[in-house]
Image (cartoon, rainbow, N blue to C red):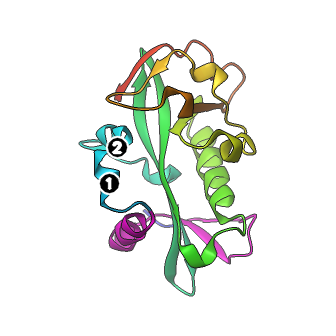
């Protein structure tokens, strides 16, 4: 697959689809951002044995170095397919400049183009509300394992895309 550039809404020159050659740098970035405790999180259970959505997963490059990453994964909520966002990671030197938001917006736009009806994540409501995510439509969604259900957020990509989400989240 060739990488496609996305017009970023950040000061960084390029957001590209993540390619296989970015994988190691992404893992290093995510490890630095979340530490070894990330493997104990419920969100990891939805990524294990799953395959990321390549056309909806992006990296931010600064002079060829990966400084940001976002990945989307196919999951089911009850009988409804949704894209699951995470992890979102930005290098400490590039935070507070809108890069995380630009990555999420690029991933959501790509998911909409790919026909996904909604994007689901576990995260900080005040941060993700700025990008159109909310807890209300996810109130009857259940994360696997121990999780703070109040942090389960969803964004509709089409009219009504976030309605009827009921039940456990599982790998598609």
Q: Is residue 147 left or right of residue 6?
A: left
Residue at (49% x, 13% y) in the render: 166
Residue at (62% x, 45% y) in the render: 108
Residue 118 figure quarter: top right
Q: Residue furthest left?
A: 49
Q: Indicate the position of residue 109 as horizontal and vertical percent values.
A: 65, 46
Read off the residue under disc 1: 37
| Label number found at residue 56 | none
Q: Residues within 10 Å of mark 1 (few under 14, many from 20)?
A: few
Q: Is residue 92 left or right of residue 99?
A: left
Q: Indicate the position of residue 158 as horizontal and vertical percent values.
A: 69, 28
Q: Is residue 16 visible?
A: yes
Residue at (70% x, 67% y) in the render: 96
| Label number found at residue 41 | 2
Position of residue 26 relative to residue 127, above or below, is below
Please report the bounds of the magenta region as a residue range. 4-33
Q: CA distance from mark 1 to mark 2?
A: 7 Å
Residue 50 figure quarter: top left
């Amino acid at each position: 697959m060739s990488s496609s550039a996305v017009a970023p809404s950040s000061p960084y020159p390029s957001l590209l689809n993540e390619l296989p050659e970015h994988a190691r740098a992404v893992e290093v970035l995510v490890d630095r951002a979340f530490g070894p405790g990330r493997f104990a999180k419920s969100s990891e259970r939805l990524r294990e044995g799953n395959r990321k959505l390549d056309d909806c997963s992006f990296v931010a490059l600064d002079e060829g170095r990966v400084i940001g990453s976002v990945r989307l994964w196919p999951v089911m909520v009850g009988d409804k397919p949704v894209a699951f966002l995470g992890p979102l990671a930005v290098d400490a030197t590039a935070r507070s400049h809108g890069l995380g938001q630009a990555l999420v917006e690029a991933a959501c736009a790509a998911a909409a183009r790919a026909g996904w009806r909604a994007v689901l994540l576990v995260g900080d409501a005040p941060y993700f509300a700025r990008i159109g995510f909310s807890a209300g439509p996810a109130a009857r969604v259940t994360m696997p394992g121990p999780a703070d259900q109040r942090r389960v957020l969803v964004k509709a990509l089409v009219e009504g895309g976030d309605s009827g989400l009921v039940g456990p989240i599982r790998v598609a």
